[in-house]
Amino acid sequence: MYGRLQNKNLTFTIDTKCANSGKQLRIELDSDMNITFMTEGADPFYSMALINTDKMKEKSIVDVF
């Protein structure tokens, strides 16, 4: 989301582990939330909150939560 607000192409990496199995996972995403890499065998589930940024009063999207 930050990349879109700044009109920049960004990527980010999530290093985590499965809460069920404890297996280490790596997921890489681009600015459009496309998965560009993930650990073999991973089947991630993630969600993104949809917020109308045109009408929000907070200075940061983080402050909305």
Image: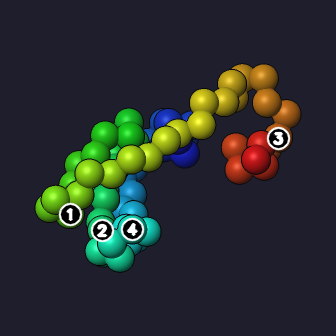
Q: Looking at the image, do the residues carrying marks 3 and 2 touch, with CB atoms under 8 Å apart?
A: no
Name the kind of residue labelled 1 in the image: Thr
Where residue 30 is drawn, which disc sits there? Answer: none
Q: Tag 1: Cα neighbours inside 10 Å, few (<14), some, or many (≥20)?
A: some
Name the kind of residue labelled 3 in the image: Glu
Q: Tag 4: Cα neighbours inside 10 Å, few (<14), some, or many (≥20)?
A: few
Residue at the image point whose x is 38% and y is 40% from the top: 33
Which badge, 4 or 3, is on the more N-terminal residue?
A: 4
Where residue 39 is drawn, which disc sits there? Answer: 1
Q: From where the camera sits, is residue 15 visible?
A: no
Cα–Cα span, label 4 and label 2: 12 Å
Q: Position of residue 37 (x, y in %)?
A: 21, 55
Q: Position of residue 23 (x, y in %)?
A: 29, 74
Residue with the mark numbered 3: 58
Residue at the image point whose x is 43% and y is 68% from the top: 19
Name the kind of residue labelled 4 in the image: Asn
Residue with the mark numbered 4: 20
Name the kind of residue labelled 2 in the image: Leu
